């Protein structure tokens, strides 16, 4: 496919996304119907679609409308490649006078839902625009080195032998940032033998802050796929349990644990094993800190769904608090940058539970390299 033909394909996919179809499904359906498209074409169209979603508001302004064509036209105008809209062959038709577009205003330039901008500014202050700008770009690929099997230099060498370049990142002692051939990682021997795991550097940094020592009894209450579970297992010899409201999310965790050389017990009723020395709640959230990985999530979020998420977070905190032992820790984390999910959520918890205190909290933003994360560490008074 020519570069212009890829634009036409991306326009068609985006029209389906804007009509309500999930981007991954729309891309899969396009790929199945376009057998002529090679792997490079599919990757290029995917990149165009997700870049347009990351920059949806500004691209719609530049392209003259919130349509697949408008988004891709705006994206090309920003890149100085409007000439690809030539109408020749499989290229999109040349822009009409009605598609002149405009420069994005200050709000559109943030590429955030308008209703959310006041809270974004309240939480981030002077970093409002820089963090929003960071979320307009593709996320780096990070690996966590499994120190139970190798060290950073050993992992770099193993990856390098397969043509994958990676360098240490200062935010976490276990982190490597992939700088070349990221698409090879999941088929590499370094990954398949458990030397490295795919994990954002901020997520790794969150685990490094946790007070983990050998022998502790630990529960990962919202384990999901188990990324933080395995990261904790690599830091100390723990008695480790994992739970998720949807157990199917943990389907791959036993195999991943074996590959990593870790022991994890899955539980559907974590209360039965209480008390724990540490409970980690990596709570369901808006995902606002990781919107460059999931740009659709940015535009799907509504005031009502955010309110529901905040209610769910509070209910989880109330559930797990009694599971923590007398001298234990409750660690609350989100991949969000919104105060109502983070600082305000903890303040509300402490009001409901005056026998607890906040020992310290941390905010990580994309300006540090990884996703946006919040972590609060609490203990009983």
Image (cartoon, helix red, strand yellow):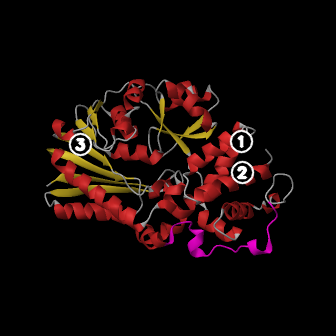
Q: Earlier in the sequence, mark 3 or mark 1?
A: 1
Residue on which disc 3 sits: 278
- Label 1 Cα crowd, 10 Å radius (few <14 / some 14-19 / many 20+): few
Residue 366 in view of the camera: yes
Q: Is 209 situated above or below 181?
A: below
Residue drawn 51% across the image and 43% down it = 169
What is the span of residues highlighted in magenta in the rendered image?
93-114
Q: Nearer the viewer, mark 3 or mark 2?
A: 2
Q: Which of the 4 quarters of the picture holds residue 94?
A: bottom right
Residue on which disc 2 sits: 9
Q: CA distance from mark 2 to mark 1?
A: 9 Å
The disc label shown at residue 175, or none: none
Q: Nearer the viewer, residue 278 or 26?
A: 26
Q: Nearer the viewer, mark 2 or mark 1?
A: 1
Residue on which disc 1 sits: 34
Q: Is 168 situated above or below 341?
A: above
Q: Is residue 151 left or right of residue 94?
A: left
């Amino acid at each position: 496919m020519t570069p212009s033909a890829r634009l036409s394909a991306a326009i068609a996919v985006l029209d389906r996304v804007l009509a309500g179809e999930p981007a991954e499904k729309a891309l899969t359906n396009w790929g199945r119907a376009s057998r002529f498209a090679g792997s490079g074409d599919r990757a290029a169209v995917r990149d165009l679609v997700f870049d347009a979603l990351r920059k949806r508001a500004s691209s719609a302004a530049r392209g003259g409308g919130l349509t697949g064509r408008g988004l891709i036209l705006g994206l090309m105008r920003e890149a100085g490649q409007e000439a690809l809209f030539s109408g020749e062959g499989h290229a999109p038709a040349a822009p009409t006078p009605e598609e002149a577009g405009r420069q994005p205003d200050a709000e559109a330039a943030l590429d955030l839902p308008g209703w959310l901008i006041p809270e974004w500014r309240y939480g981030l202050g002077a970093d409002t625009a820089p963090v929003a700008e960071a979320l307009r770009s593709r996320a780096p690929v990070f690996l966590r080195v499994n120190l139970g099997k190798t060290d950073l230099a050993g992992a770099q060498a193993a990856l390098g032998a397969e043509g994958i370049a990676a360098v240490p990142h200062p935010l976490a002692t276990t982190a490597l940032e992939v700088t070349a051939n990221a698409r090879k990682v999941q088929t590499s021997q370094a990954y398949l033998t458990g030397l490295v795991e795919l994990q954002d550097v901020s997520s790794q940094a969150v685990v490094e802050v946790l007070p983990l020592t050998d022998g502790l009894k630990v529960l990962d209450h919202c384990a999901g796929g188990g990324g933080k579970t395995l990261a904790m297992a690599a830091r100390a010899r723990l008695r480790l349990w994992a739970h998720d409201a949807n157990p199917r999310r943990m389907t791959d965790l036993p195999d991943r644990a074996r590959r990593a050389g870790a022991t994890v017990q899955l539980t559907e009723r974590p209360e039965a094993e209480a008390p724990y020395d540490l409970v980690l709640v990596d709570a369901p959230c808006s995902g606002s800190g990781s919107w460059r990985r999931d740009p659709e999530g940015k535009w799907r979020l509504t005031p009502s769904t955010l309110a529901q998420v905040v209610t769910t977070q509070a209910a989880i905190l109330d559930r797990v608090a009694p599971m923590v032992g007398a001298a234990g820790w409750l660690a609350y984390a989100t991949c969000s940058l919104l105060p109502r999910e983070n600082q305000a959520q903890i303040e509300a918890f402490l009001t409901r539970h005056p026998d607890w205190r906040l020992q310290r909290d941390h905010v990580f933003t994309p300006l540090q390299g990884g996703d946006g994360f919040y972590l609060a560490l609490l203990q009983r008074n």
